Image (cartoon, grey):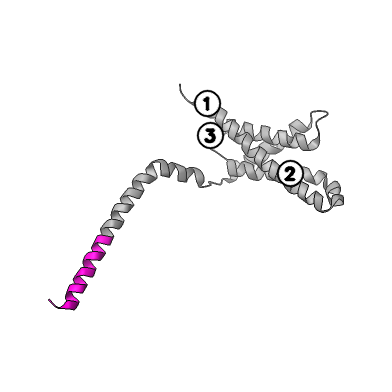
Amino acid sequence: MSRSGESLLEREQDADRDTETARESLGQNSRESRGRLGRLRRRLTPSFSGRSLLLAVVAALAGSVLVGMIPFVPGSVATLVGLALGGFLLGVVQSTASYLEMALAGGAAAALSLVSDLLLFSAAGTAGSIVAGGSVIAGVLVGVVGHYFGRDLRNGLTRSL
């Protein structure tokens, strides 16, 4: 056999080994996707649903309005407590996790709450923008934390002993 024929044969054997190694690693990956890595990947991959977003917006606004009707509670505190209450109730009622939707709804509800105080923030200038941004971030965090605790309660109530 000539030298070029031998090198061609070695290349083919190397390619076969690489293909076999790739198949083995795919088999390993498919086993891992069913295990812990797969569960982690499913948890971290956001699954956005329009229906869940609508429910989250309704829960956030309803919670904010209900708590806002309590006398002697400042508007910003009522909004944040209402967002936490809405997220909590959504977590208790809904069977699937809606953290992304609740974050969007919490930020939107906090932003809508700021519209009522728009003149105050526009008169404050740059400081008003910082406060407005902080309020939206607080709305997102409070909504997500409320949803987390609601899901935790739901899991505790529905899990068998």
CA–CA distance between discs 2 and 1? 31 Å
Which numbered disc, 1 or 3, marks the residue closer to the eye? Answer: 1
User: Badge 3, how many Cα within 10 Å: few under 14, some, many 20+?
Assistant: few
CA–CA distance between discs 2 and 3? 29 Å
Above or below 86: residue 31: below
Residue at point 62%, 36% (across, down):
145
Q: Nearer the viewer, residue 65 or 46?
A: 46
Residue 18 showing in the rendered view: yes
What is the three-letter code of the residue carrying label 1? Gly
147 vs 67, left or right, is left
For marks 1 and 3, the one nearer the N-term is 3
The percent coordinates of residue 5 (x first, y second) are 17, 75
What is the three-letter code of the residue carrying label 3? Ser
Report the span colored magenta. Answer: 1-18
Asked if the residue at tag 3 contacts the one at tag 1, i.e. Cβ–Cβ closer than 8 Å, the answer is no
Residue at point 78%, 45% (across, down):
114
- Write down the residue under mark 1: 156
What is the three-letter code of the residue carrying label 2? Ser
Q: Residue furthest front?
A: 3
Q: Is residue 39 magenta?
A: no
- Write down the residue under mark 2: 135
Q: Secondary structure at mark 2?
A: helix
Above or below 101: residue 4: below
Which numbered disc, 2 or 1, marks the residue closer to the eye? Answer: 2
- Write down the residue under mark 3: 95
39 vs 152, left or right, is left
The percent coordinates of residue 96 (x first, y second) are 53, 37
Above or below 69: residue 57: below
